[in-house]
Amino acid sequence: MGMSALVPHYTAEELRRFPEDGLRYEVIRGELFVTPGPGTVHQRFVLALARQLADYVDRYELGETFLGPFEVEFADDTAVQPDVLVLLHDRAGQLTPARLMGPPSLVVEVVSYSSKRIDRLQKRALYMDDGVAEYWVVEPGLRRVERWVPGAEAPELLSDRLTWAPRGGLDPLVVDLVALFDRATR
């Protein structure tokens, strides 16, 4: 008689009891993912892009921009910490003092060596299946952004300029990716 391995099924509540040790703990559909803290290029890019997003969102009073680590709970067994997220006003009711309960409007993940698989596979599936309107996977090493929207079979690949128009009738945010990558990788 064979012995089957028991794979733990984690919950968001269990995740919150993990130590504050500099590692990022996330759970997606019960599966635990642990990644080390990000490096310099990652943090430079996150900060520079978040500034542009926050300025745009604030200028047009669209909602709020958050930097990770900030918990987003999708279900009892699914809680992640995106690098950057935007919450437009139509989803503001999901925000609690401790976390966001439900999908953000926009999620940005900056890929690092240890997060590449998670960002591209598990997180993409989660975000696209569970109501995130737009997901950007930033690849500093390739100097490009993959833009995913629900229902797309492939991402839009951007390396020069990224245009984001969360609401019609407003000038879109235009991000100069060349300058952003130059600044982050200096």
Image (cartoon, rainbow, N blue to C red):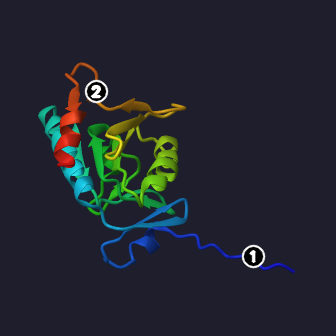
Above or below, 20 relative to 42:
below
Left or right for 53, reference 81:
left
Which amino acid type is shown beneath numbered disc 2?
Answer: Ala
- Residue on which disc 1 sits: 4
Element assignment for label 2: loop
Q: Is residue 69 visible?
A: yes
First-in-chain label (2 vs 1)? 1
Residue at left 28%, top 39%?
88
Give whichever of 70, 152 is nearer the camera.
152
Give whichever of 157, 93 is nearer the camera.
157
- Residue on which disc 2 sits: 165
Element assignment for label 1: loop
Above or below, 102 relative to 40:
above
Number of other residues with Cα within 10 Å of mark 1, as a class: few under 14, some 14 to 19, many 20 or more: few
Residue 131: give its label: none
Which amino acid type is shown beneath numbered disc 1?
Answer: Ser
Q: Is residue 53 visible?
A: no
Q: How many marks?
A: 2
How far, Cα to Cα, is label 2 from label 1? 50 Å
